[in-house]
Image: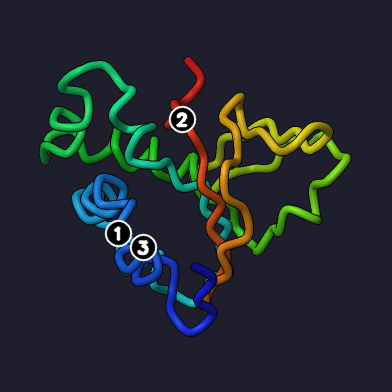
């Protein structure tokens, strides 16, 4: 699925398995940002990750009145710069996200991000990289 010719958004659309994520990015008005120069590292929750949220959560978040909350959640999944799996192998770090919070990345036994497992790593894009995760990251209280 590596596609260094397409940007992050087009790669996610073409993959077909990120329809909920693409809909959320669209609702939050982040499409142009994620089609921008970057580079970006995106931790992309799978469709199953979104399905695991409590019933109605996604429908509620994509409503216009919840755009700020949705944007904060989505930006938690984006790191400035391009970070490949090999860059974190054997390391533990707490990088700042595009939204200004930090996420805990643990590369000592596979790779986890705030407890979510990276299930597919290093999907190369023209403006960054996508890593598929098995849970939706939520802001810390």
Q: Which residue is mark 3?
A: 15
Q: Answer yes or no: do the residues labelled 1 and 3 have beta carbons within 8 Å?
A: yes
Measured in 3D between alpha carbons, the distance from the residue under mark 1 to the one under mark 3, in whole angstroms, is 4 Å
Q: Is residue 104 above or below residue 97?
A: above
Task: Return the x and y of residue 88 as percentages of the image width and height.
Answer: 79, 47
Q: Residue at x 63, y 60 (%)?
A: 122
Measured in 3D between alpha carbons, the distance from the residue under mark 2 to the one under mark 3, in whole angstroms, is 18 Å
Mark earlier in primary sequence (2, 3): 3
| Residue 16 circle label | 1
Identify the element where label 3 is drawn.
helix
| Relative depth, front residue between 131 and 71 | 131
**Dot 3, how many residues are within 10 Å of its Cα: few (below 14), some (14-19), or many (20+)?**
few
Q: Residue at x 51, y 47 (%)?
A: 132
Q: Answer yes or no: do the residues labelled 2 and 3 have beta carbons within 8 Å?
A: no
Q: List the single residue furthest toward the bottom.
A: 5
Mark earlier in primary sequence (1, 2): 1
| Residue 135 circle label | 2
């Amino acid at each position: 699925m590596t596609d260094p010719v397409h940007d992050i958004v087009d790669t996610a659309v073409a993959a077909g398995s990120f329809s909920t994520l693409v809909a959320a990015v669209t609702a939050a008005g982040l499409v142009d940002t994620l089609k921008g120069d970057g580079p970006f590292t995106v931790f992309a929750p799978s469709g199953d990750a979104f399905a695991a949220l409590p019933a109605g959560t996604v429908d509620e978040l994509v409503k216009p009145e919840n755009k700020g909350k949705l944007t904060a959640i989505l930006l938690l999944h984006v790191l400035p710069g391009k970070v490949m799996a090999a860059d974190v192998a054997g390391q533990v770090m707490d990088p700042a996200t595009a939204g200004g919070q930090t996420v805990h990345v643990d590369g000592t036994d596979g790779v986890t991000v705030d407890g979510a497992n990276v299930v597919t790593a290093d999907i190369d894009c023209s403006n960054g990289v996508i890593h598929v995760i098995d849970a939706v990251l939520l802001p810390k209280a």
